[in-house]
Image: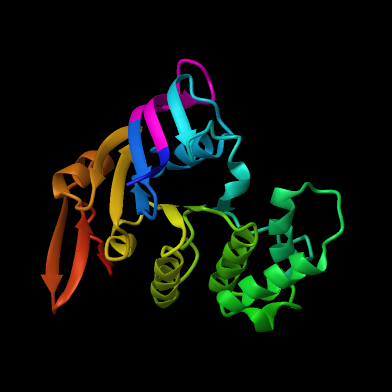
């Protein structure tokens, strides 16, 4: 299967002598739905920056769609972890239209085609009725859908998401992952999260990272997660509902 992202022996960071990720070998095939999991501070967001071409590795090579990362950046849709600054008033439709600028530069007027594509993606994510509302008036789940619509407005081949469900409730998470499953029929998806239980039932593959790549594949062993998170981990069944339990004893339902 054709690969969309490939990292070979990648080491990177922000200050020489203090690597955030090191010796990462990772291949993401076309049409994959990959979750990158690991503890806070384990290098997940840094890895996304390397894939986006925003951070140059100290060692190793990176290719995205067969080229160096910066070149195909217009083909990548990115959904950040942080919601836009609430002190800045902007409507939903204007946020989505910003996704059209990625392919043609910042200083131009939006065309009728731009607006048609923005409207189409609002409808695709079932938020057309929010178009004229201020982003600050939306719930966390609604904001995340708007940010995905913005990313999709550039017609990407790859969708990268950084902790997209960190601020939404469990029911909204389920709806969100079902939506990503539908999008995955035409787009390769890489999703970063620290929540093991939330993603395991929805994705095709899981990469477990804590500074380096600990495991990568369709299944996730308790030993790999324990090594990454530094605490015991097991999957148990309680009342017919699977729970993932970390060493703290707190349960994460999925």
Q: 127 and 116: which one is in front?
A: 116
Left or right: 245 as drawn, with respect to 204: left
Left or right: 251 as drawn, with respect to 41: left
On whether residue 14 falls in the magenta region, the answer is yes
Q: Farthest residue in the top direction? A: 17
Left or right: 20 as drawn, with respect to 72: left
Q: 247 and 40: which one is in front?
A: 40
Q: Can you say which quadrant of the picture contains the C terminus?
A: bottom left
Residue 90 is at least partly visible in this image? yes
Coloring scheme used: rainbow
Give coordinates of residue 5: x percent, y percent: 43, 40
Give coordinates of residue 222: x percent, y percent: 15, 49
Give coordinates of residue 9: x percent, y percent: 36, 24
Left or right: 138 as drawn, with respect to 172: right
Q: Which residue is drawn at 27% across and 43% down?
A: 229
- Quarter location, residue 10: top left
Residue 41 is at least partly visible in this image? no
Q: Farthest residue in the bottom direction? A: 129
Q: Is residue 206 above or below residue 89?
A: above
- Quarter location, residue 203: bottom left
On whether residue 228 falls in the magenta region, the answer is no
Query: Main SS of the magenta segment?
Result: strand
Which portion, as a residue range, is magenta?
Answer: 6-24
- Quarter location, residue 197: bottom left
Give coordinates of residue 73: x percent, y percent: 60, 42
Q: In this view, does 174 lie above or below 64?
A: below
Q: Which residue is drawn at 40% across and 72% down?
A: 178
Q: 11 and 31: which one is in front?
A: 31
Q: Residue at x 36, y 53 (%)?
A: 32
Q: Residue at x 36, y 52 (%)?
A: 34
């Amino acid at each position: 299967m054709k690969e969309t992202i490939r990292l070979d022996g990648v080491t990177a960071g922000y200050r020489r002598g203090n690597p955030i990720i090191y010796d990462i070998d990772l291949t993401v095939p076309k049409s994959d739905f990959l979750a990158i999991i690991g503890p806070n501070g384990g290098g997940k967001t840094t890895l996304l920056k390397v894939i986006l071409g925003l951070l140059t590795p100290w060692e190793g090579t990176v290719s995205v769609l067969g080229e160096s990362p910066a070149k195909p950046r217009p083909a990548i849709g990115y959904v950040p972890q942080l919601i836009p600054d609430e002190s800045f008033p902007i409507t939903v439709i204007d946020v989505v239209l910003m996704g059209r600028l990625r392919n043609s530069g910042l200083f131009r007027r939006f065309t009728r085609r731009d607006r048609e594509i923005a409207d189409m993606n609002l409808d695709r994510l079932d938020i057309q009725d929010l178009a004229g509302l201020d982003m600050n008036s939306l719930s966390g789940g609604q904001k995340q859908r708007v940010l995905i619509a913005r990313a999709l407005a550039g017609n990407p081949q790859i969708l990268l998401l950084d902790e997209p469900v960190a601020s939404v409730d469990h029911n909204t998470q389920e709806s969100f992952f079902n939506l990503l499953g539908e999008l995955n029929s035409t787009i390769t998806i890489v999703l970063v999260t620290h929540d093991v239980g939330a993603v395991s039932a929805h994705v095709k593959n899981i990469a477990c990272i804590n500074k380096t790549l600990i495991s990568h594949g369709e299944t996730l062993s308790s030993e790999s997660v324990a090594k990454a998170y530094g605490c015991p981990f097991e999957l148990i069944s309680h009342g017919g509902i699977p729970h993932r339990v970390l060493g703290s004893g707190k349960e994460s339902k999925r």
